Image: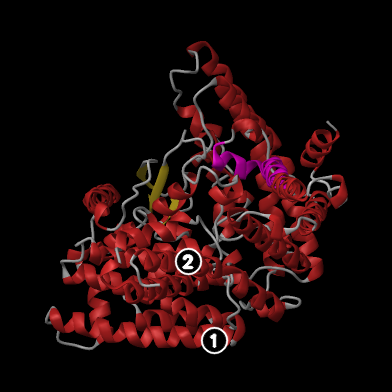
Amino acid sequence: MLRTVLLAAAIAAGLAMPAADALARPEAAAVQRNASAQALHRLFDEEWQRGLRENPEGATFNGDKRYNDRWSDVSLGAIQARQAADREALARLKAIDRSLLSEADQLNYDVFAWNLEKSVQRQKFREYLIPIGQSGGVQLADGILEAQPFQTVKDYRDWLARLRGLPALIEQNQALMREGVKAGIVPPKVLMQRVPAQIAKQIVDDPAKSPLYKPFARFPEGVPAAERAALQGEAQQLIRERVVPAYRDFAAYFDKEYLPAARSGIAASELPDGKAYYDFLAADFTTTALSAEQIHQIGLKEVARIRAEMEKIKTEVGFKGRLAEFFAYLRSDPKFFHKTPEALLTAYRAVSKRIDPELVKISKKIPRQPYGVRPIPDNVAPDTTTAYYLPGAVDGTRAGFYYVNLYKPETRPTWEMIPLSLHEAVPGHHFQFASGLELADAPMFRRTGYFVAYGEGWGLYAERLGYDMGLYDDPYDRMGQLAYDMWRAVRLVVDTGMHSKGWSRDKAIAFFLDNAPKTEQDVVNEIDRYIGWPGQALAYKIGQLKISELRERSRQALGEGFDLREFNDEVLSTGSVPLAVLEKHIDGWIARKRSGLGEG
């Protein structure tokens, strides 16, 4: 009886074990393993719940409705409390003996540790003092409407609560911006010049024309007709009396104080401790130890390789002229563009339907969660990228969505549509996120996790899977694939160029236009994105190169036993992880396959 009580108590508490003579040695070892596993998963669960509480917007995007009536607390006190909680969580993790965990839990431990260590390391850079950018921030608070549900009266009352709390959120952001000005942690002026127009769209005379009012324009059947007028009236009152005045005050502060205080330079290295900050970001986003100079050189090598492939396409289609002239032709000939946003959206949806039946050629495991194609909201489209993906809800109540930019269709060439769709939808981001959600035995942070080098590396790798799927039969579509590959290679050069080598914005734009046929509208938006999000763009090509390297390693090791579909499924089977973790997993898969083939 004593043994049973001790075993149960130790497992429940996750405590150190009694002395060896108190228990039979095999039983003691089992108790230690169980206690360590339980302590680990208790930490995972508690931290997951803390993350949802502290980041209500993230909870909404995950499909958790419990916090749909509130915003994140971004006061300095709350930020400091979250940072302290991250440090405490890391200490708790380090107290668990990793060697006692199963192989699966050692992987969970390593990924969790990587995330926490990076969270703690980045605290000293005080990124929160730049809370807004040209493509995100409180001035674009209506963006959450893409994920917030509106099926019941409770859903609408949750949104009314968020409207009620929006002025306080704006003030908290303003306080952070003031602190950033004092500390010299401010964004580049060239980016901030885009923001006044975004704030202005929130300042309306008619509340019904506010982007925040959109849910009240049409009600689902779940909202009784008798309730609708009252909900609309409350929304209009909140927008008129509280939200619009708050944005009007914010606009005045932004125009008179913040924009003049923004820095004239663009490099992250200009910020306090900026060189260390950029080195940290490069390592964080790529999940490697590569230096900025090494990444720059990899980029130059890739640019040269892809240019040579582009020259072959130019010759194949019979274009008589230099590559720069071919780029100009691709950017401008009317045959490569749709005339209206509606026609462009129809074409994107047709491309997705063309891809879907070919997926069986590259994967044995098609995720169950569906996806759809939607336009990027009009109020952000001019300042954002060509497309993006929004993952589905964790509980399956919202599908994944591939968002496409319909702004200025005359700048959206048809030759980019196949690689873009392969990357953002299937088998790119939708496969990666939906497959992660199907990791039934993994903790939630693994199922929903996102390492940029893995996720965007897979997305870029997926663009090349179009060859395996038989989708690149047109040379202009192949040029599109090369253009997208070049786009990510150029990123390695211009991101490191601007943030660590002193390149100007104009030099970066010129290098991009010289080496890729993307339109100038896209190129300028891209360069501004790299200025505002240092290091993030490095992850795509670095991740793709690693996955491609692992594919070739597997093919050579397995010979006729290599199955592309199995390899792709193995890459996705880990969920999103650092590249070194993925490499270790694939090497283990190769060894198991070789053993099964009788090759040692």
Q: Position of residue 23 (x, y in %)?
A: 82, 45
Asked if residue 46 is among those painted magenta in the image, a careful observer would answer yes
Residue found at x 31% / y 75%: 517
Residue occupying image coordinates x 23% and y 60%: 469
Ranked by sequence position, the earlier of labels 2 and 1 is 1
Q: What is the crowding at mark 2: few (fewer than 14 residues within 10 Å), some, or many (at least 20)?
A: few
Magenta highlight range: 41-63
- Whether residue 67 is in magenta: the answer is no
| Extreme residue in the top direction | 226
Relative height, residue 392 to residue 335 (above, below): above
Quadrant housing residue 450: bottom right
The residue under the point 29% across, 49% down is: 345
Q: Write down the residue under mark 2.
A: 588
x and y percent of residue 24 in the render? 79, 46
Q: Which residue is mark 1?
A: 294
Query: In the picture shown, does residue 138 fall above or below 244?
Result: below
Q: Are marks 2 and 1 in contact (CB under 8 Å)?
A: no
* In this rendering, position of residue 269 left or right of residue 566: right
Identify residue type, mark 1.
Answer: Gln
Residue 240 shows in the view: no
Question: Is 83 placed above or below 248 here?
Answer: below
Q: Amino acid at mark 2?
A: Gly
Name the quadrant containing residue 535.
Answer: bottom right
- Direction from residue 173 to residue 139 in the image, left or right: left
Q: Of helix, strand and loop, which mostly describes the magenta segment?
A: helix
